[in-house]
Amino acid sequence: MAAEMPGTALRPHERSFRRLVVAAGLCWSIAFPAIALYHQLELYGDGAMFSYAVAVQDVWAFHWHNISGRTSVFLLTLLPAETLAAITGSPWSGIVAYGLLFYIAPLAGLAATYVADRSPGRLIFLYACGSTALLCPLIFGFPTEMWLAHAIFWPTLALSHYTGSTVLGAIVIFAVSLLLAFTHEGALVLLLTVFATLAPRGLQSTPFRRGVANLIVIVLLAVASKILLPPDDYYADAFARAALHFFDLAIFRVEVVVEVLAAVIAYAAAFGLISIWLPKRACVYVLGALLLLLCIYWMNFDHSVHANSRYYLRTALVVATPLLGVMAAFAAMTKEGIIRDPLPNLQHNLVWSPNRVCAVGSVLVVVTLIHVVETGKFVTAWSRYRQAIAALAMSHESDPELGDARFVSSGRASPDLVPLEWFSTIPYLSVILSSFRPNRLVIHPTGNYFWLSCATATNNRDRELIVPVQTRELIRTYSCLHR
């Protein structure tokens, strides 16, 4: 991001670049809830089980008591949605509310960052927009809690640096820091990043001392939550396995990451070469050539769908968001004169020359276009997958070898839809897509993870709810076969 250096006014090309970054971030944050609600992405992956839990008003018992370290997501999205479902007597109203509250988080986060940011030129807001445009599309569609962690991180960073030394300010910062820490265990990395960026302001400064106090209290609360609200034995094992693979480098060996890296490297190499002969027009020529190559690739060679890999790329947010946060804070403090740069004007002229700003802007355009295409492919495939599961749920096909004559295998769907499968939540998806009155419960034939215990599913079946008891009995039967 272009940072205005002390004593140096922004030039027209830098202002244009800033507008591009802000526009990209805002456009994506507005598009997220619109696309998600239209395509029912609140039902994708784990979202199917979360949505079913909202519909039957049992979110905490179904799963969230197992993940006390992610209580913020429960309080901000699932609890209000469950409450709405109970008040209105409409399961769908709760599900839609859950989707809206979850996917509007980036927009709310940017709005809060803009209000809280008092850095010169609102640099933290600028970086927040860039981070939203570059990182969030990688995981968009899968309801990972890191989605909310990213949204809350940026206003937390701005508030920590620029809130005055008042009691109200201290309370606000503690509240948002606590919300951040309890979105996901990985969010503690984001909170530590916020704390670390306060050190250059002075170890005796109010922001740093306030950060130390907040960090100590929040870490103690996080530990206490794990002790007082431990997960069930079944989930504890699964959680341990997931934690061991959270930073597995194999996570990044997916088509979209390779595509983005290849495009950026190709652009940088071509730009460096062509700018030798055509320094003023190199960025435009290279951009045009790269876009042409991408179009040829998409039309003739690309057959991938970035679907279930969206969940695993949450790791990218844990790694990249802190780096951008540090860059934002240091850029702001450099401009304030807190961090001294011995060669500010020289760096400003070398790094942010019109040609290089054009090149960085072009890379942003390329990456954004890749995200747009990948998102389009994903939601198109997801729409087909929803139709396939709904058809199976309403069919009279049966695979009794799965445990019951009312079960049908998801393997009957088209093989090209396999990248959309999330085996553990297919039964809940089939219930919702059949308007809670399925003829068959759709089961993944080789599924080996089961969300509900028999006791939990039985208790839910015996409650007085709008969702038909016959449907809840299907879920109970399925759960009791395995847990």
Image (spheres, helix red, strand yellow):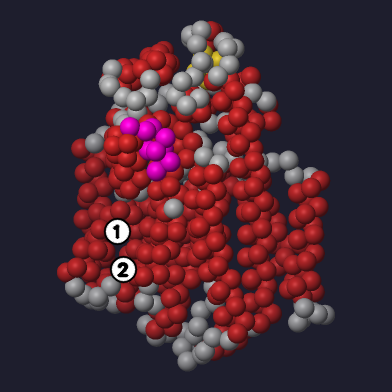
Residue drawn at x 26%, y 40% is 226
- Measured as percent of width and height from the top left, residue 444 is found at 54, 21
Left or right of 319 in this view: 216: left
Determine whether label 1 and label 2 are within 8 Å by CB.
yes
Residue type at mark 2: give it: Ser
Work out whether residue 364 or residue 200 is closer to the camera in this orientation and state it: 364
Q: Is residue 92 magenta?
A: yes
Q: Which mark is residue 60?
A: none
Q: For residue 415, what is the image quadrant?
A: top right
Residue type at mark 1: give it: Ser
Residue drawn at x 47%, y 92% is 7
Tally of numbered tags: 2
Residue drawn at x 40%, y 70% is 114
Q: Where is mark 1, residue-wise?
A: 177
Q: Is residue 237 visible?
A: no
Tell me the quarter of the image containing the N terminus.
bottom right
Q: Is residue 89 above or below residue 409?
A: below
Span shown in magenta: 89-97
Element at label 1: helix
Element at label 2: helix
- Measured as percent of width and height from the top left, residue 320 is found at 50, 58
Q: Is residue 279 above or below residue 267?
A: below
Q: Is residue 94 above or below residue 217?
A: above
Q: Where is mark 2, residue-wise?
A: 160
Residue drawn at x 42%, y 81% is 120
- Measured as percent of width and height from the top left, residue 411 is found at 62, 20
